[in-house]
Image (cartoon, rainbow, N blue to C red):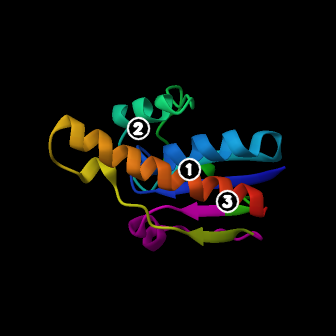
Amino acid sequence: MKKILVLCTGNSCRSQMAHGYLHHFGKDKVKVYSAGVEIHGLNPFAVGIMAEDGIDISKHTSNHVDEYSDIAFDYVITVCDNAKEACPFFPTKTKTIHHNFEDPSKSSGTAKELIAEFRKVRDQIKIFSKEFVTSI
C-alpha cells in the first residue's frame, strides 16, 4: 500500500479535494493523508462541491504537515506553489510531485461564480488524481 501526502497552504480546499479523490480512485492501494503548511480549517464550499460528485470529505480535518513527520511517505504531492516552496524535507525514499491548482477560495464574485470556480478546480483535481492513481 502506497502512502501519499497531499500538501497545500492551508489544508482547506485543494489538498482536501485531492485527498478525497486519491482515496476514491486508489481504494485499497493507497493510504492518503493531507496537510498544510498552515491550518485554515475545512472550507465548506469544498465539502459541498465534493458532495455533488459523490465524495464525502465532511469528516476530514485540517492538519499541519508537522503532524506527519514520523510517516515514511512514498509520495508527497504539492498542489500549490506556496506549499512547494515551504515543503519540508522528507529523508526517506519519498518522491515529490508538484501540480499547481488555482486556489478557489481566493476567488471573488457572486455565489454562483464562486461555485463555478470551485467546480472548475475540483474537476481539474479529479482528472489529476485519477491519472496519478492509474500511473502508480
Region rendered in magenta: 76-93
Q: Name the residue under label 2.
A: 46
Q: Which picture quadrant has residue 73?
A: bottom right
- Along the viewing direction, whichever of 26 and 119 lies nearer the viewer: 119
- Residue 61, percent across and down? 50, 34
Neighbour class for label 3 at 10 Å: few (<14), some, many (≥20)?
few
Q: Which residue is drawn at 46% across and 39% down?
A: 62
**Residue 32 to residue 92: above or below:** above
Q: How far apart are marks 3 and 1 (CA)?
A: 9 Å
> Dot 2 lies on which element?
helix
> Dot 3 lies on which element?
helix
Q: Name the residue under label 1.
A: 126
Q: Disc 3 or 1, which lies upstream in sequence?
A: 1
**Residue 106 to residue 25: above or below:** below
Q: Disc 3 or 2, which lies upstream in sequence?
A: 2
Q: Disc 1 or 2, which lies upstream in sequence?
A: 2
Q: Residue at x 41, y 29 (%)?
A: 48
Q: How far apart are marks 1 and 2 (CA)?
A: 13 Å
- Residue 17, percent across and down? 51, 44
Determine the residue located farthest toward the left in the rendered image: 109
Q: Mark 3 points at which residue?
A: 131
Q: What residue type is labelled 1?
A: Lys
- Along the viewing direction, whichever of 46 and 82 lies nearer the viewer: 46
- Residue 129, percent across and down? 62, 54
- Quadrant in which the C terminus appears: bottom right
CB under 8 Å between discs 3 and 2:
no
